[in-house]
Amino acid sequence: MKELMYLKNVVTLRLTEENCNGCGMCKKVCPHAVFELSGGKAHIVARDYCMECGACMLNCPTQAIYVKSGVGCAAGIINGILNNSEPVCGCPESNAGCC
């Protein structure tokens, strides 16, 4: 599955597990197996495989998922160019995956 990764640490995907009802819809609609169900809740297990299509967010009945469709890779590339560095989302190291 490694071939599905776009850019590391640039995805805007967030899951508020407290709001999750464990329905599994996110896992069903995700084309890249980003989610897993365990303990009656969804968990993000492959964040960097997310292509930001938004299907998980649109199908989550409890609004536990947020993703800004299509911006992660573009934002990562632009930040890398502007900062003359590797493509990253600009999040502080202490808050990896904040996007």
Image (tube, grey):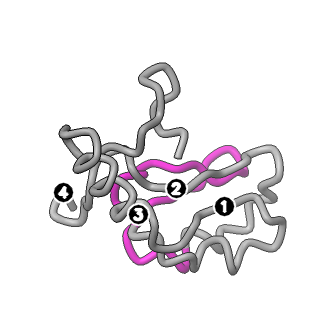
Badge number at residue 12: 2
Task: Give residue 48's position: percent from left, percent from top.
Answer: 35, 53
Circle nearer the viewer, 3 or 4: 3
Observer-nearest of 75 and 15? 75
The answer for how far apart the CA atoms under marks 3 and 4 are is 12 Å
Q: Does the magenta-highlighted stretch encompass residue 63?
A: no
Badge number at residue 2: 4
Tally of marks: 4
Q: Relative to 13, does residue 30 appear above or below in the rendering?
A: below
Q: Secondary structure at mark 3?
A: loop
Range drawn in magenta: 28-50
- Amino acid type, mark 4: Lys
Q: Residue at point 55% right, 56% down?
A: 13
**In terms of sequence position, does the residue under pointer 4 or pointer 2 come before the other?**
4
Neighbourhood count class around disc 2 (C-alpha, 10 Å): few under 14, some 14–19, many 20 upward: many
Name the residue carrying label 3.
50
Name the residue carrying label 1.
66
Q: Secondary structure at mark 4?
A: helix
Q: Residue at point 47% right, 35% down?
A: 91
Q: Are marks 4 and 1 in contact (CB under 8 Å)?
A: no
- Amino acid type, mark 1: Tyr
Task: Give residue 22's position: percent from left, percent from top.
Answer: 74, 59
Q: Are marks 3 and 1 in contact (CB under 8 Å)?
A: no
Q: Secondary structure at mark 1?
A: strand
- Amino acid type, mark 2: Thr
Task: Give residue 70's position: percent from left, percent from top.
Answer: 45, 73
Q: Are marks 3 and 4 in contact (CB under 8 Å)?
A: no
